[in-house]
Amino acid sequence: QQQVKQSPQSLIVQKGGISIINCAYENTAFDYFPWYQQFPGKGPALLIAIRPDVSEKKEGRFTISFNKSAKQFSLHIMDSQPGDSATYFCAALYNFNKFYFGSGTKLNVKP
Amino acid sequence: KAGVTQTPRYLIKTRGQQVTLSCSPISGHRSVSWYQQTPGQGLQFLFEYFSETQRNKGNFPGRFSGRQFSNSRSEMNVSTLELGDSALYLCASSSFVGNNEKLFFGSGTQLSVL
């Protein structure tokens, strides 16, 4: 079964808008939650990550919100730009070296 | 520093054949993991090697196997190919030293099974 559930599958946002992607997990043993960004023809690249002892982490226009009690975390992209158009994957780390990835969200930012 | 290199970039095979994919990690990285990416399924974990030892394995049939060499380079083999094996296969390397869990992905090998 899918260890990390991601939604929505696709997202269209106007330039300057806020993009929000959500993920949920069940295993409380996960201890590291990264987001990866993938452009066509490329492998995923780490965008931002958070540990469960923190409720929010911000890097530039990208913010992770983490709700430990609800076992949910989300990526917020502020002031979305056409260059942000990509596929985004959330992930969770188990046992120090095994990652579980969500199914991905294809973001399209309209100019 | 060179990134993760995967070869070949594209492969076309027919059902029943076998295939070997190669991955050269970032210099100094001892962990190499493999993922299968298909539309709608995201990245499915295949296995992870560290210092030539398989540490973790995903839920894939025994037709999928891998190995890691002393220089950390890794190969993945799929035998008796099926149409459903068509996917992008991604390799990722990591140092996994201390709290550094960052994965560095290659561009992948796109496998098409006809």
Image (spheres, rainbow, N blue to C red):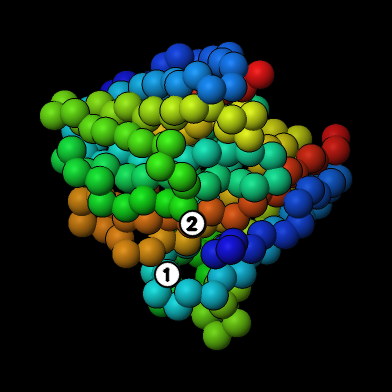
Q: Position of residue B82 (x, y in %)?
A: 59, 30
Q: Viewer-proximal residue, A43 or A74? A: A43
Quadrant that contains the N terminus of chain B: top left
Q: Which numbered disc covers residue A100? A: 2
Q: How many marks?
A: 2
Q: Amino acid at mark 1?
A: Phe
Q: Which numbered disc covers residue B108? A: none
In the image, taking residue A74 as reference, residue B63 lies left or right, namely left
What is the secondary structure assignment of the residue under circle 1?
Answer: loop
Quadrant in the picture for residue A28: bottom left
In the image, taking residue A111 as reference, residue A72 lies left or right, namely left
In the image, taking residue A51 as reference, residue B49 lies left or right, namely left
In the image, taking residue B90 as reference, residue A109 lies left or right, namely right
Q: Amino acid at mark 2?
A: Tyr
Q: Which numbered disc covers residue A30? A: 1
The residue at the point 19 percent across, 28 percent down is: B69
Report in which chain the residue with disc 2 lies.
A
Can residue B18 be seen here? The reply is yes
Quadrant in the picture for residue B64: top left
**From mark 2 to mark 1, how far is it between C-alphas?**
9 Å
The residue at the point 60 percent across, 82 percent down is: A70
Q: Viewer-proximal residue, A60 or A100? A: A100
The residue at the point 85 percent across, 35 percent down is: A111
Query: Mark 2 vs mark 1: same chain?
Result: yes
